[in-house]
Image (spheres, helix red, strand yellow):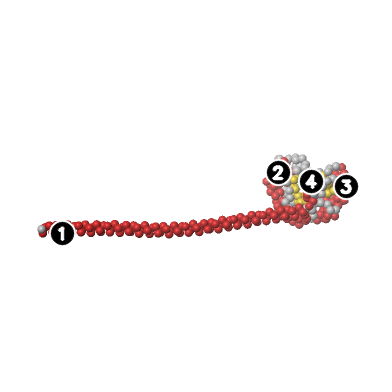
Amino acid sequence: MKNKKIIILVLLFISFCFLLFCLFNFYKLYDSKIKVYEKQKSTYENLKKENNKLKMEIANETKRGEKLEDSYKSLNEKKESLEKVINEKEAEKEREAKEQNQDYTKKVTGKVIYLTFDDGPSNYTEDILNTLDKYDVKATFFVTCSGSLDKYAKKIIEKGHTLGLHTCTHRYNTIYSSEENYFNDLNSISNKVEELTGYKSKCIRFPGGSSNTISRFNKGIMTRLTQKVTEDGYKYYDWNIDSGDAAGADKEGVYNNVISALKNHNYSTNMVLMHDIKVSTKDALDGIIKDALDMGYTFSNINDYTSEIHHGVNN
C-alpha cells in the first residue's frame, strides 16, 4: 500500500513537472510571438508613417507642379501678348513708313522719269533734296553705309522719296567674291536702313549694275545673284539713261547726256543713273528737271508699279 502511494506521488510529481515544462515552453513561444508581433507592429507603424510622409511629399510636388504649370501658362500668355504687341508695333512702323512715303505705291502713267541717285548720301544730298523739293519731284536713292546715312535716311523717307539698297560697302572684290558675302553686305545696309527709319526696303541696285563685268573674277556670280535676290522677294533696277557723272562728266555734260537721251529715245520708263556724291549732278539737276517738265515728262520715285529695268547679265 505504501509503495502504491509512492508511485502515485512520483507520477503526480512527474506530471506536475511536465505541466511546468509545457507551461514554460508555451510562455516562451507566446513571448516570442508577442515580440514578433510588436516588431511587425512597429515596422507597420514606421511604414505607415513613411507612406503618409510620401503622400505628403507627392501632394506637395503635385501642388508645386500645378504652380509651375500655372506659371508656365502665365509666362506663355505674356510671351504671346508681347509678341502681339511687337507685331502690332512693327506693322504700325511699316504703315507709318509707307504713309511717309506715299508715292511708293502710286501708279504713274505717261512719259515718266525716275531719277536715281547711287552711292550716297553725301555732302551734296541736302542740295539735291532741296532741288527736288523746289519742283515737288520724287526720286530714288540707292544708299550705302556712308557716314551721312544716319543724317539723311529718315529725311529721304519723310520727304516721300524711295530709299533703295546699294550694298553697304560697295567693294566689288568683296561683295562679288561669293553669294554669302554679297548677302551679308546687303543685309548690313538693309538692317541699318530699317534701324534708322523703321522701313524694310526690297528695292535694290547692284553696284556696277546687273550687267557689270568687274565681277568676272567669279564666274557666273551675277547670274546666281540676280536669280537669288528675285527668289528672296527683292526687285533690282538697272538704268536705261546714264548721266555720265561717274565717268567724270561736268555739269554741262551731265545735263546734255540726260536731256539728249530723253529727246532721242521714246522710253515709257526713263530710269536715269546719277550719283549724289558728284558735284556735277548736284549742279545739273535743276536744269534737267526744269527742261524735262517743259518737255512734258513727269517724275516719280520707284514704286510697286514701276517696271524693272534690267540689263543683260554678262556673267
First in sequence: mark 2 vs mark 3: 2
Residue at 70% x, 43% y is 231
The correct choice, above or below, for 61 with respect to 248 in the image is below
First in sequence: mark 2 vs mark 4: 2
Query: The disc labelled 3 sits on which kind of residue?
Result: Gly
Residue at 87% x, 49% y is 293
Q: How far is the residue under mark 2 from the one under mark 4?
A: 18 Å
Residue picked out by circle 1: 9
Q: Are marks 3 and 1 in contact (CB under 8 Å)?
A: no
Q: Secondary structure beneath disc 3?
A: loop
Residue 231 numbered tag: 2
Report the side of 213 relative to 77 (left or right). Answer: right
Q: How far is the residue under mark 3 from the one under mark 4?
A: 19 Å
Residue at 81% x, 46% y is 271
Residue at 75% x, 48% y is 203
How crowded pointer 2 is (Cα within 10 Å; few <14, some 14-19, many 20+) is rated as: few
Identity of the residue furthest to the right in this view:
294
First in sequence: mark 4 vs mark 1: 1
Name the residue nearer the viewer: 286 or 298: 298
Identity of the residue furthest to the front in this view:
1
How crowded pointer 3 is (Cα within 10 Å; few <14, some 14-19, many 20+) is rated as: few
First in sequence: mark 3 vs mark 4: 3
Observer-side mark, 4 or 1, equals 1
Q: Are marks 4 and 1 in contact (CB under 8 Å)?
A: no
First in sequence: mark 1 vs mark 2: 1
Residue 306 numbered tag: 4
Name the residue nearer the viewer: 36 or 145: 36
Q: How far is the residue under mark 2 from the one under mark 3?
A: 37 Å
Residue picked out by circle 3: 296
Query: The disc labelled 4 sits on which kind of residue?
Result: Thr
Q: Quadrant of residue 217?
A: top right
